Image (spheres, helix red, strand yellow):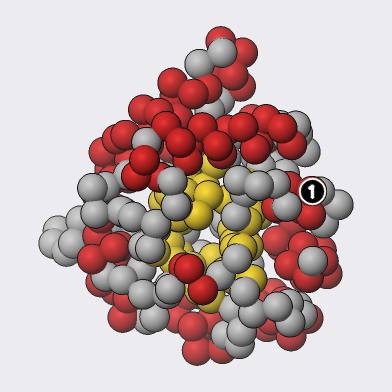
Amino acid sequence: MIKLDNFSSFFVANWKLNGNFKFIDQFISKISLPKDSSKCVVICPTSIYLDYISKNKMGFYLGAQNVSQHKDGAFTGEISADSLDDINVDFCIVGHSERRQFFFEKNEEINHKSENLIKNNIVPIICIGETLEDKKKGITNDILEEQLKKSIPISSNFENSIIAYEPVWAIGTGLTPTNDEINDTHSFIREHNAKFNKFKIIYGGSVKANNVNEITSLLNVDGALIGGASLKSDEFTKIIQD
Ligand code: PEP
């Protein structure tokens, strides 16, 4: 497993259902990775391209976007943590809000997925976050507390898992919480249970080249999960450069 403590920050590109061989070849040839090796850059393509990128990657790490909660067996169409490990996947996003929303993933399932990944020495990047409705009702911290309690397995610790705080209303909308709100929420996650004190906690939701520095330099923020802006090699290069 990657030694998370070797890194000061994490920049995770979530390509979602985008990309093909041509896109990947161009992207890899165009991005310029940071000279600062304490920055960990992770690219998460769709599953079909993981093996190709695994064999062509240079200077960045490989992440999947999802994994089965089952180890093996009669689960047509699923991809296991063991097979991700076979092709040298380092990280895996779990519990992204799009999976929770469109594929009805529940905290318990996310917990099993994360546990399987850890057993295979793959770092789960476990996503949590409130909807706009939750925010308006003033129940953000309650929602996060429930997600943390149920979706993070007992085997998770600061050396084998990452938490991604992604307010659902900020994903792909161009809206972001204020910097104080982001920092306070990360501090809430870190402090509400001693288990999370030393966890790497990254922020996701409309991170772009023009706001990444202010967000990732916040005291309690250890990096960013980037969707839309990670699909443009020049913008992503700016994001990871400084
Ligand atoms: C995401 O998909 O996790 C995400 C944060 O997307 P975007 O950066 O486009 O808001």
Left or right? Give the position of 78 relative to 93: left
Q: Residues within 10 Å of mark 1 (few under 14, many from 20)?
A: few
On-image quarter of the C terminus:
bottom right
Give x and y (percent) for residue 55.
50, 89
Residue at 30% from the left image edge and 62% from the top image edge? 117
Give x and y (percent) for residue 139.
50, 16
On-image quarter of the N terminus:
bottom left
On screen, residue 142 above or below 129? above
Residue most extreme to the right: 210
Q: Is residue 69 visible?
A: no
Label 1 within 8 A of ligand 1 by Cβ:
no
In what element is the residue under mark 1? helix
Residue ID for mark 1? 214
Give x and y (percent) for residue 195.
34, 44
Q: Is residue 121 visible?
A: yes
On screen, residue 230 above or below 210? below
* Amino acid bearing label 1: Glu
Residue at 38% from the left image edge and 63% from the top image edge? 159
Q: Quadrant of residue 115?
A: bottom left
Residue at 65% from the left image edge and 38% from the top image edge? 183
